Amino acid sequence: MTLQDLSNLGTFIAALATSISVLLALFTYRKGYQREALKNVREKIATYRIKYQEVNNLLDTSCSVELGVCISNEIKALVPRPHSTTAIAEFLENEDNVNYITQSCYLGLANAKAIQTSNELYVISSAEQEMFPITGKLLSTLSLYPSSVLTTINQTDYLEPIPKGIYSKQ
């Protein structure tokens, strides 16, 4: 073997070692990523009952009060000053303000901390669903009821224009 052959052999071995090192690093990274994703999925499964109870508490009176306060704060910002009872009643009964009231309801719901917290409870990343399709499907099936409750709470389709005279003194 000549010196040139030894040099070529050394270059080949160095290139091969570099390639193996890169492949090993990618494999290690992928395994770590999968391990972290599996840990997150396990944590979601383990805490599912607690999260379900938290969403169930949305139907509690305290959450209703919070939603009402958030919506009323948004509507109060639209009512002309001074904020007297008659000014608020006239604003709410005016049919021209229905769109503003509906938008205020959406903003109030979006600003409510209970709604924001509950919307974050059932987030399953697409990477986790791709890596663990059966578990992702299970979690999405288990969260059908709570997510439907959240969807219903976040809708203002049931709001209708306020009848005239409902806030006026009789």
Image: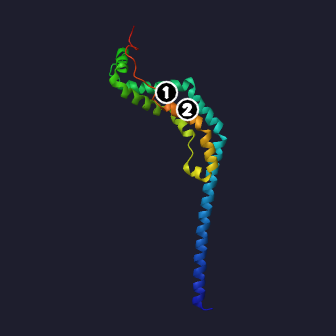
The numbered dot on residue 67 is 1
Secondary structure type for disc 1: helix
Does 97 sit left or right of 37 as displayed? left
Numbered disc in front, either 1 or 2: 2
Across and down, in percent, residue 131 comes to 61, 53
Residue identified by numbered label 2: 149
Residues marked 1 and 2 touching at CB (< 8 Å): no
**Crowding at label 2, few (<14), some or many (≥20) Cα neighbours within 10 Å?**
some
Rounded to the nearest angstrom, the CA distance separating label 1 from label 2 is 14 Å
Across and down, in percent, residue 2 comes to 60, 92
Quarter holding the C terminus is top left
Across and down, in percent, residue 20 comes to 61, 71
Quarter residue 49 falls in? top right
Q: What residue type is labelled 2?
A: Val
Q: Is residue 16 depicted above or below 30 in this figure? A: below
Question: Residue at image x 54%, y 27%?
Answer: 63
